[in-house]
Image (spheres, rainbow, N blue to C red):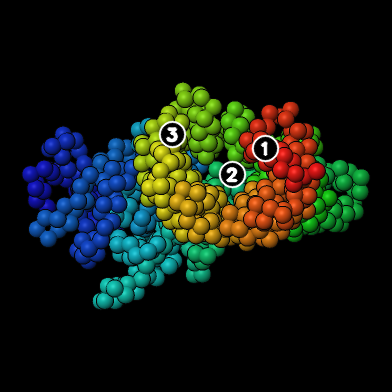
Amino acid sequence: MQRNISDTYEILGKIGEGNSGEIYKAYHKNLGKEVVLKKVKTEIKDFVNNRAEVDVLKNLRHSCLPQVLDFLQIDGDVYTVMDFIPGNSFKQYLDAGTVFPEKSVLIWAKQICATLGYLHNQNPPIIHSDLKPGNIMLMPNGNICLIDFNISASLDGNCAWVTGFTSGYAAPEQIQAMKYNRNELDRSRWKTVDARADIYSFGATIYHIMTGQKPKPDESGFVEDIRNKGRKINDVFASVIMKCLEPDPQKRYQGAEQLLSDLKNIQAKDKRYRRLVQKQKIIYICTAAVMFLSAGVAVSGYFRMDAEKQKKYELLVRQEAECISASDFDNFEMYYQEAVNLKPKELEAYYQKALALHQQRQYGDAIEFIQSEILNNPDIINGNDTLNNVYYLLGNCYEKQEDYAQAANCYATAITIMSDNADYYRDYAIALAYNGDMEGAREALAEAKNQKLDSVEIRYIEGELAYVSKDYAGAGSIFQECIRNTKDEYIKMRAYIMAAKCLDASGDGAEILMRKVKMLEEAAGVLSPEYNIGILEQLGQAYSDMAKKTGDASYDMKAIEVFKKIKEQGMGSYSTDYNLAVLYQNVKDYDRASSVLNQMLTDYGENYKTYKSLALLEVAKQSERPAGEKNYGAFKGYYEKAHNLYQEQLANNVNDVEMDRLKELYDQAVANGWIQ
């Protein structure tokens, strides 16, 4: 190896060799610091040269990854340059016989998983493809850093070309792909792996760190259960690791986000498990004392009945969740009632009910349900230390109602129960900002960073804070950056909505409104139905605004199609139908407008807004009739209903200028003799 690479880098020595190239320590003369140079293997460098992944790599920003500084092509060789990471690899510690405490391993596991999720969510995705103890550094600050991620693996869609593997850590499909690729001269036909290969390697790596032994699959590809390796390990943590090590990729976690969610909830799940075991022990002891010699049969039968009951309950809760995903809220109610009748003191079924109300955007009902049926139910809350998700959901409901003080309080409570969930800090920071506590918001943001929240989500929070500070241009730029860089549909959806708000704040001209329409159309096209409801609502309103701004009724028709789509997806609400009725009236389809409004009285009960719309519809219909044929009898009835219901709400400071306009129309009809 030559001593100098260009005029910038002085080679200090070779420090290793990975599956994708040789690794050297070097001195960066311009920056005055040590760096790492990775020489890409000859057989794969051609892939790198022709792809845009280098730009992706140079834009990576994550606290658990080295910064990629440069990409060099010298004398036919390809090099990548990145930060030198201080510390020792886990392989070095394992070779020295170090035994790590489980609590620390769990923290590092979450950091590794979050970093993999960040890599997998790049565009194109980056598959590490060589995750192992030797490629994970434990830095002096106690955090991990992934090194030698496979930056030279060309990516194709969501897959990576297989260029090597490390026995014991590589997924079965990666090994098979490599065996094939070695004998295939046509590189365009090489086999690939996806992110699930990294999930397997993650499980193998944590298995080794926990037990001190590299996993050894049997002939069928299965690894011996980690609980049989002589080391005490949390049962839930063990199950997570073994699920990662499934030989069949379909049976593993399908993504790092799903895996990280289970890692974050291990403590809560383990407490529920331990309570169940303790309960069973107590039952066993009591029954044994009474039954004596016949206890074996009796207790066995009891446990079978209790296990069957628990199994049925868990099935019902899963069916609740499936109904929510499918927006099948009619069948949901059946499963919910059966579940709470079976186990009225268990939390899970109630939580799914609250989630269903939230999904239907019935935020007020969800708040009331959580408060009355869960938090005011001693049988559920006494001794229950898994209420963090309930408080988080409650906070989100308050946030949707723009009650940011209550939202912040709920998020804070969720954090006190589970202090290592980065998502809680994300939404806590945003709620504090909207509540005027910018200092508290920045502190929550700092804690989100400490919890290794995804860097795109960190940027999203910064965008929200910029928006609250009325830096709409800066906020809009950040949200656009988030849209480009995240694969998380929830964050992408939120970023689109906030970017639209930034446009609203920058002016109300036709050009800006058109930009908003185009952006929301883009969002509706890329987001799945589960995440596009808020986008569709905004798009429908934007089309309506365009119709008013330009006088082009075709935008009203587009808005109608959008709101109809919302209803078709099972996510219609009062506001959806209300908007539809107004739009039908705008295009003078009075029959459909009337049909929608009358159905609303059946579906949602009496509401002054519904009667107000019926009254305004009658005015529109009668205004097109000759003077001698006008009949305002129906208008009079609707107006009086709307007026009386509206007056009942004045105590709540309802101020609807359309009601003032409606009264003027009523007085005018009386003055003209159209109403007696």
- Spot occupied by residue 91 in the image (x, y as percentages of width and height): 36, 47
Q: Earlier in the sequence, mark 1 or mark 3?
A: 3
Residue 163 showing in the rendered view: yes
- Spot occupied by residue 632 in the image (x, y as percentages of width and height): 75, 49
Q: Earlier in the sequence, mark 3 or mark 2?
A: 2
Image height of 11 relative to 76, above or below: above
Q: Residue at 25% across / 41% down in the picture?
A: 83
Image height of 100 relative to 525, above or below: above
Instruction: Determine the secondary structure under disc 1.
Output: helix
Q: CA distance from mark 3 to mark 2?
A: 36 Å
Q: Earlier in the sequence, mark 2 or mark 1?
A: 2
Image height of 486 relative to 647, above or below: below
Q: Which mark is residue 633?
A: none
User: Decide: marks 1, 3 in contact (CB < 8 A)?
Assistant: no
- Spot occupied by residue 236 in the image (x, y as percentages of width and height): 60, 48
Total count of labels: 3
User: Decide: marks 2, 1 in contact (CB < 8 A)?
Assistant: no
- Which residue was labeled with disc 2? 266
Q: Using a 10 Å C-alpha cutoff, classify the residue at mark 2 as few (fewer than 14 neighbours), some (14 to 19) or many (20 or more).
A: some
Q: Using a 10 Å C-alpha cutoff, classify the residue at mark 3 as few (fewer than 14 neighbours), some (14 to 19) or many (20 or more).
A: many
- Which residue was labeled with disc 3? 467
**Which mark is in front, 3 or 2?**
3
Q: Residue at 75% across / 38% down in the picture?
A: 643
Instruction: Determine the secondary structure under disc 2.
Output: helix
Residue 587 image-quadrant placement: bottom right
Q: CA distance from mark 1 to mark 3?
A: 39 Å
Residue closest to the eye, 573 or 364: 573
User: Decide: marks 3, 2 in contact (CB < 8 A)?
Assistant: no
- Which residue was labeled with disc 1? 664
- Callout 1, which amino acid? Glu
- Callout 2, which amino acid? Ile
